[in-house]
Image (cartoon, rainbow, N blue to C red):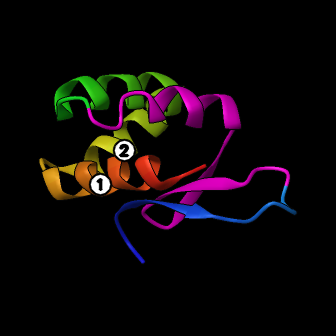
Amino acid sequence: MKGLHFEHRGEGSYYKVVLHIGNCYVPVSDDILEELSTLSSAPAERFLSAFLRHLGYSSYLKTQIQTELDGETQQVEALQRFLRNWG
């Protein structure tokens, strides 16, 4: 599946959630999930800024995330919806 989305891996995994970016993925720590969850109802621009700060920790990842989003507000809304339902 292409695009940008979270996948819940389950309680038995070290990282319970991974972020899929196109054909690759990045593990997401519980701390980052908790912080991003507090912004799950924030305006898309504010959420995206925090999202990039926490998960775009290299220039490569930041570019990949921005490329996958490409102005798609639906993907940002889906990420926020996942975080509202997480935990």
Q: Which one is nearer the viewer's eye here, 36 or 59?
A: 36
Residue position marked by numbered label 2 in the rendering: 65
Q: Horizontal and vertical percent for residue 61?
A: 47, 38
- Is residue 56 something that shows in the picture? no
Q: Is residue 49 above or below residue 28?
A: above
User: Contact (CB < 8 A) between labels 2 and 1?
Assistant: yes
Q: Is residue 7 visible?
A: yes
Secondary structure category for the residue under label 1: helix
Query: Is 66 rendered above or below residue 20?
Result: above
Q: Which residues are magenta?
A: 14-41
Q: Which residue is mark 1?
A: 68
Which amino acid, mark 1?
A: Glu
Q: Residue at x 69, y 37 (%)?
A: 30
The verdict on residue 27 being magenta is yes
Q: Identify the residue at image location x=64%, y=54%.
A: 17
Secondary structure beneath dot 2 equals helix
Q: Residue at x 62, y 63 (%)?
A: 8
Dividing the image into 4 quarters, which one contains the N terminus? bottom left
Measure how far apart labels 2 and 1 are at the Cα level. 5 Å
The local crowd at label 2, few if under 14, some if 14 to 19, many if 20 or more residues have their Cα within 10 Å, is many
**Residue at the extreme bottom of the image, as rendered:** 1
Is 40 positioned to the left or the right of 70 in the image? right
Whole-percent x, y for residue 45 in the image: 18, 28
Q: Looking at the image, which residue is at 37% across and 71% down?
A: 2
Q: Quadrant of residue 53?
A: top left
Q: In screen coordinates, is 12 left or right of 21?
A: right
Q: Is residue 77 magenta?
A: no
